[in-house]
Amino acid sequence: MRTESEELQFRNPALHRAPLGYRKNGPLTWVAECRVPREAPKLARLEMARWMIENGSDVHQGGDGPLMRAALADERLPMMELLLEYGADVNALWDRRYPILCAPCETLAPKALKWLLDHGADPNAATAEGYTALMAASILGNPEAVALLLKKNADPQAQTRQGQTALMLAQLSRNRIAAYDRTGGNAPYISVPEPTLLKQAQAKHDRVIQLLQSARQRTRK
């Protein structure tokens, strides 16, 4: 017996392409994101996603939007596995510009990041502006992600169109945090504004910088 949602989509296949969810990527993206409620996907949600794919939803909608949104959180690995089973592309450019590998770097989801890399994601995939996952992790001061990406052969010498490397971006982010600390919160916007977290953020950026400097030295030998 079909659920109410399945019955609606069965009677009106166009609903599979309805412009809803993040960036209007469609119903499957909304289901895959597991956002409401925000929790690991239960069997019912996984079966809903499976039914939708088998009955008309495109796993690649929005540039593999379902996989990109699922990759934002570690607890969504079962959904990522399901999407891969139906052909999701770990190297797709979401919205034609954003490597899916960048998603878990920005949300600090190490298990999702490792899963993507283990399933063939290109560690050097870049946006049109030249930003890579390594750069995203470096800007945010995510040493675990930086270490994993370097281990998987991410290029520390890669540059954006403006000529910035991951190391340069990490140093710039670190300097902004230090400026915020010195001025008591009057520096330009940074990603970690709470004073109680500044020292921790600085330490993480310092570790990122160390990792990138070591990687740069190895590539020069």
Image (cartoon, helix red, strand yellow):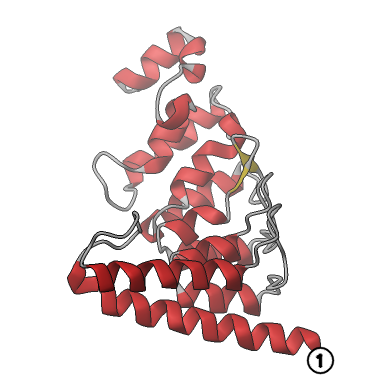
In the shown orientation, is residue 26 left or right of residue 37? right
User: 202 or 183: which is nearer to us?
Assistant: 183
* Residue 1 quadrant: top left
In the shown orientation, is residue 190 left or right of residue 210? left
Depicted 57 relative to depicted 183: above or below? above
Depicted 187 relative to depicted 85: above or below? below
Extreme-right residue of the structure? 221
Instruction: Determine which residue is flagged by label 1.
Output: 221
Depicted 109 relative to depicted 42: above or below? below
- Point out the image quarter for the C terminus: bottom right
Element class at badge 1: loop
Q: Residue at x 49, y 64 (%)?
A: 139
In the shown orientation, is residue 41 left or right of residue 131? left
User: 159 or 182: which is nearer to us?
Assistant: 182
- Can the viewer see residue 141 in this picture? no
* Residue 183 quadrant: bottom left
Extreme-top residue of the structure? 11
x, y percent for residue 28? 46, 31
- Can the viewer see residue 154 in this picture? yes
